[in-house]
Image (spheres, rainbow, N blue to C red):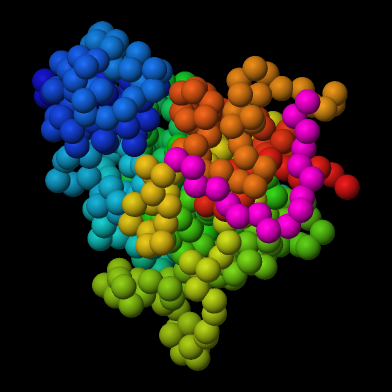
Amino acid sequence: MASVKYWIWLSSAAGVGPLTARKLLDGFGTPERVYYAHAEDYEQTMKLKASELRGLENKDLAPSESALEICGKKGYRVMTIQDADYPERLKNIYDPPIVLYVRGHLPDIDEEAVVAIVGTRKCTRYGLREAGRVGREATRRGLLVTTGLARGVDSAAARGALGAGGRVIGVIGSGLDVIYPKENAALFDAVASSGALVSEYPPGSAAIAGHFPARNRIISGISVGVAVIEAPLRSGALITAADALEQGREVFAMPGNVDAPSCEGSNDLLREGAIPLISADDIAAEYSARFPDKITLSEARRNAPARTRRRADTVPAPQTGGEDGEETEDARPRGGAPSGKTGGESADSIKKEVDNSTQVEYIDLNAPDISLTPTERLVAEAVAPGGVHIDAVIAGSSLSASDVFAALTMLEIKGIITRARGKFFSLAPKAP
């Protein structure tokens, strides 16, 4: 257990994201060696930003030891990326967390047909009803539901799955001992009793806005597919769907009223080629051959003729952003591209810009009606009009990754930038 505190130290080092931590582990072998290294040792292994170097030079182990003590008292497990039962499915995404905190019993993810059920916090009664129904049906078909346990669709899906006697994996954006939203305390307990609560943040970590986009890539990373029940055009659920596409997962979307703002994003996914979701049979049918001993189709679906459809990996990444109020917590994608995706972008290629063959007039950052904080302006100025990869934004702004993620969230909400494709961002076109 002594070495675990070094894992916690590295995963929590200010300014050091999971991708940098993984590269440091590749270079030094163990987090303990990373801890005892000096600035010149780091520089010989990889080029670091000043913010990353400052984080690594903070050798205070007290917070890590405190977190480890809390985990011991509360019965939380600290799982590292080098543990034998760390999910391979998650390990193979672009930026897997090097540490997971687990409350409850995490199933063998790689042997399960895990499906994420996500959607807006501010859902309609239709969204609540359908999320609960799909959660129940998914459980009865042998799928394992995962969700973010946020208000609205996430909570309804989890309750539906639990009501059907199923297990649920809840991936949260705070420490395991921080209940958010507070009214979900009983739901958190029920999830931990039947399945597991999972977080990459140590005990005591608050549910801050920057944590939720990072959480989204874990939700899709442990899943074989992502089902979007109800989502407006700017929604964290669409970010989870975009992450899923980049990770090579299928995306399902439930049709909604064409005149309902809360369904505009999910309806757009269908227009762009997502798999239509009418019942959990639509999800189960996708994976029944892959998990024949887990999944049971309804008699109607077993007897139905085969249907052809467009593959989910042809679905363009949706434009994403934040909804007003609490929904903005989910409204930021993580940086990078999946390591296992063919034809993907290399994380080491900083200047990867999207070709722009048409003449477009973009937002003027100096316009009198544009109000930006100094950090937001630095990030906005690092975004190319034609589109630029997230790595280039971080490098061009000279800010920490977490500061860039937070600023991009606000810039998307303000309509200053848009997601061009994958992990690329562009200045928004000027309104006609």
Q: Which residue does the image show at 41% across and 65% down from the upper left?
A: 140
Residue 332, position as x, y percentages in the image: 56, 38
Can residue 380 be seen in the rendering of this structure? yes
Q: Which residue does the image show at 41% across and 44% down from the upper left?
A: 349
Q: Would residue 160 be found to the left or right of residue 221 on screen?
A: right
Can residue 202 be seen in the rendering of this structure? no
Q: Which residue does the image show at 51% across and 62% down from the upper left?
A: 251
> Which of 371/116 is in front?
371
Q: Note whether 223 is above or below 311 in the view shown.
A: above
Q: Note whether 272 is above or below 69 in the view shown.
A: below
Residue 353, position as x, y percentages in the image: 55, 48
Residue 78, image quadrant: top left
Q: Note whether 234 is above or below 101 in the view shown.
A: below
Residue 16, position as x, y percentages in the image: 36, 25
> Which of 59/166 is in front?
59
Residue 408, image quadrant: top right
> Which of 58/206 is in front?
58
Considering the image in quadrants, where does the N terminus appear?
top left
Residue 374, image quadrant: top right
Is 363 part of what is drawn in magenta?
yes
> Which of 173/176 is in front?
173
**Which residue reaches farthest right?**
432
Q: Which residue does the image show at 64% across and 43% down from the upper left?
A: 426
**Which residue reaches farthest left?**
2
Majority SS type along the magenta span: loop
Residue 132, position as x, y percentages in the image: 55, 55
Q: Note whether 146 is above or below 16 in the view shown.
A: below
Magenta-drawn segment: 350-366
Is 309 part of what is drawn in magenta?
no
Q: How many marks?
A: 0
